[in-house]
Amino acid sequence: MANDSATLSLLGERVPFAAYVTAMAHFRGLIDTLSAELAARTPIEWVVEDLTRSSAITTIRGEATSPEGRESVERVITAYDSLAATLQRGDLTGYSPKIVREVAGLTEILNGNVEAIVFQSALRETIIRKREAPGIGEWQPALAVEAYGAIEGRVQTLTSRGALRFTLYDTLHDRAVSCYVAADGDSLLRDIWGKRVMVEGWVSREGKSGRPLAVRQIMSITELPERGTGSYRNARGIVPLGPDGLLPETAIRRLRDA
C-alpha cells in the first residue's frame, strides 16, 4: 500500500472555524518543513485529497513523477507519523526549532471545543489530547484501539489515485471513517460510491469514546439494502408481540406524555 497521504482530524462536537484555519496553517507549515528537511532536492506537490466536515478531517496527498520523488513522499509521511508518536510521549528533543514551532501552534487549539487532534496515515493514527488534570508532561496518552471487526455506513468519497482510499460515514456515530484498501483490492471498490455498505477489516477506534477512526486490511465490502421509511417497524425483540401488546410508537408516545 502506498503511504502517500497525511490526514489531520480535529475531534469535537463543534469545531470553531478559527481553530480549523489555525490548524490548517500549522499543518501546512509542518508538511512544508518536513519536506524541506527530508526531500529538499525532490519537487513534491501536496494536493488536497479530501475534506470532510465531520471532525474537520483534511487529507493531503504528495504527488511526484519520479521514483525518487515517490520515495521522498513516503519518507515525509513516515516522518509525520514518527513526529506524532514522539509528540504523544511529550518530548520533541532532536527536532528542529521550525518543527517545534509548528507543533506548538497546532496543539494550542486544544481548548475544549477541539478535544483532540488525530494524526493519520495509511499505516496508523496517533491521538493527541491535552491533559484534563495536572500530571507529568502536557499530553495525555490517548491510544487508538485496534481490533478486527466491521463498520456499517455510507460511502461518501472514493479515490484511486495513489493509495486506494474511501471515506465511510459511520451509521452509529455519523462520523467519517477513513478506509484504506490494499493495492490489489480495487475490485472491492466497484460500484460502492454513495451506497450503504458493511466494511470488514482491522478497525481503529478512539480509546475514550470508542468511535471508529479508520479501517485497514479490508477483507470485504458488502452492499446493504437501503432502509425505507418506517423500517423501524420491522424490528423484532426476543419476546413476540402478543395480541394486546403495544406497538413501539405507542409505547414511546406514552412514555413521552407521562
Image (tube, grey):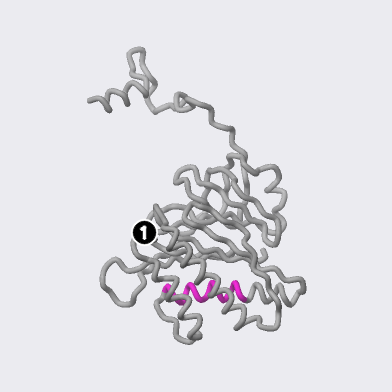
Give the residue at the far right of this rendering.
66
Q: Is residue 98 magenta?
A: no
Q: Considering only vertical position in the picture, is 171 above or below 107?
A: above
Q: Is mark 1 on a helix, strand or loop?
A: loop
Judged left or right of residue 247, residue 83 is: right
Judged left or right of residue 154, residue 142 is: left
**Whole-percent x and y of residue 143?**
42, 65
Give the residue at the far left of this rendering.
258
User: Which region of the structure is painted magenta?
Assistant: 76-88
Where residue 237 sits, quadrant-wise, is: top left
**Whole-percent x and y of residue 239?**
37, 24
Q: Considering only vertical position in the picture, is 79 above or below 248?
A: below
Q: Mark 1 points at which residue?
A: 113
Q: Considering only vertical position in the picture, is 211 above or below 239?
A: below
- Kind of residue at disc 1: Asn
Q: Which residue is drawn at 58% across and 39% down?
A: 196
**Whole-percent x and y of residue 169?**
53, 47
Which one is nearer the viewer's eye here, 16 or 81? 16
Q: Considering only vertical position in the picture, is 94 above or below 178?
A: below
Which one is nearer the viewer's eye here, 173 or 26? 26
- What secondary structure is the stretch in magenta mostly built from? helix
Q: Residue at x 51, y 69 (%)?
A: 25
Judged left or right of residue 250, residue 61 is: right
Q: Residue at x 71, y 79 (%)?
A: 42
Q: Is residue 77 magenta?
A: yes
Which one is nearer the viewer's eye here, 164 or 26? 26
